[in-house]
Image: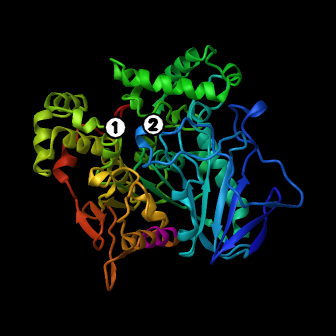
Amino acid sequence: MHSTVPTSAGRVRGQRTGEVTTFLNIPYAAPPFGPRRLRPPQPPQSWTGVRDAFAPGPAAPQPGYLPAMAGLLQDAGPQGEDCLNLNVWTPAPGRRGGGLPVMVWIHGGAFRNGAGTLPAYDGARLAADGVVVVTLNYRLGAEGFLLLPDGPSNLGLLDQIAALEWVRDNIAEFGGDPDNVTVFGQSAGAICVTALMTMERARGLFRRAITQSGAGHHSHPEPIARRLTERLAALVGAEPTRESLAAVAPERLIAADAALSREIAQATDPTLWGESAGGGTTVLPVVDGDTLAQRPIDALAEGAGRHIDLLTGTTSDEFRLFLVPLGIDQRINDEALHAFLTGLGLDADRARAVYAAARPGAGPGDLFSAAMSDHAYRIPALRVAEARAAHDADTYVYEFAWPSTALDGALGACHMTEIGFVFGNLPTALAGPAAPEELSAHMRRAWTSFARTGRPTADGGEEEMHWPSYSEHRGVMRLDGAAPKVLLDPAADQRALWHHLRRAGPRGV
């Protein structure tokens, strides 16, 4: 069964399955190549007649994941120039004024991989719970996040804003409420969402935000962003300008970005590369004073985004995804652990004792993973909650604690494990075959109730459970295989280790 809906560029036809109609590959901006290469997004070309929205559109050019991640993480499908497209799942197509909450997903992938059409992000199950779901593609890597002296920065963020403008102008035709939009994302997507909360160009485009395993610290100041652009340009034999880099084939830029990532991972002076030290990513949102005026956590500390409702959280064992499949956890010994902890600005002996006390029998690799999970994910999320509490802006915090059964349980509740539960797409390769549907139901209820009202609802069994804001005694909702449970200041001794890393400063966490 088909449904046809008008948009600002032309009519689109979607396919209905059950109670949800799906519209795929709707262009929200023109292809960002040719004369539009490394320039801000431009409106899509209009069409006549009805455009079939049955098949996924191209993903942004990207390198794909390392072979060691095969079977755990899925590479994007076909890639191409016409990559600025989005997808809509709705239970009320053509019902203008239907007034359903809208949830717009921004995918992760270390700013270099991902697509809105990955199977894990299929929005049908979530939409069946009474919301309109939108997923989108945006420019990645050098195409999306270089600092260019003769062009704007943060093109990937500008793409996301263009998609949100499309939602504002069109989503009512799909049964959604343009005045009740929740932007949610994971990892790099969550970092983008946090940046959008502080950007003047995004003001008024969304009312609520959900950030999963990503917060407001990861960005590049201009000197580091400029160094990245200059080095990337040198690797492809170009000048570090928009005009020169726009003449380089996308696959060459992708290869150069991978080479630069390896250089950063081997750098003897990691301070040269800021938040990209270690090589996990190269590009990040750039604090250029124009598109992004401040580092997001600093802007939040000054009150930016206080009018936006926020739900944020992390998984219990974030960093195990980056260690276990590559065997890195087994190669970390006591000496390496001590050096890592010291490099993070901690008293290594005290930090080891604190992390070990909570993990009897844990080896050096396990303790390193726990510290890095805090450093890169949990503490930044808590800093956001603290910054907002100072401006009486409630923030709801969760911890996803259900351990994956993949790789014989070695991953724990690692980075990305929660995504299938949020979308209701289980089982997943990362979560493993035993993922409990009940936990997914809890999480979908929390996420969709937050999208409706600005307050997440937790199901405590026979009655609704109060989900306190973080300002209420540092309340955190723990989500695992059992009923949700409120914890007050969980892992407080670990949190206290990071007191020296405040909001201010280019490396603060």
Q: Position of residue 385 (x, y in %)?
A: 36, 54
What is the number of the mark on residue 66? 2
Query: Which element type, helix, strand or loop, lies under badge 2?
Result: loop
What is the number of the mark on residue 326? 1
Magenta range is 445-451
Q: Amino acid at mark 1?
A: Leu
- Quarter placement of the C terminus: top left
Query: Which element type, helix, strand or loop, lies under badge 1?
Result: loop
Q: Amino acid at mark 2?
A: Leu
Looking at the image, which is closer to me, 356 or 104?
Answer: 356
Q: Position of residue 377 (x, y in %)?
A: 34, 46
Residue projecting furthest to the bottom: 462
| Point 51% across, 37% down: residue | 285
Q: Position of residue 172 (x, y in %)?
A: 70, 68
Q: Are marks 2 and 1 in contact (CB under 8 Å)?
A: yes
Q: How many C-alpha atoms fall within 10 Å of the one at disc 1: few (<14), some, or many (≥20)? A: some
What is the number of the mark on residue 33? none
Main secondary structure along the magenta-highlighted residues? helix
Badge 2 or badge 1: first in the primary sequence: 2
Which quadrant holds residue 128? Answer: bottom right
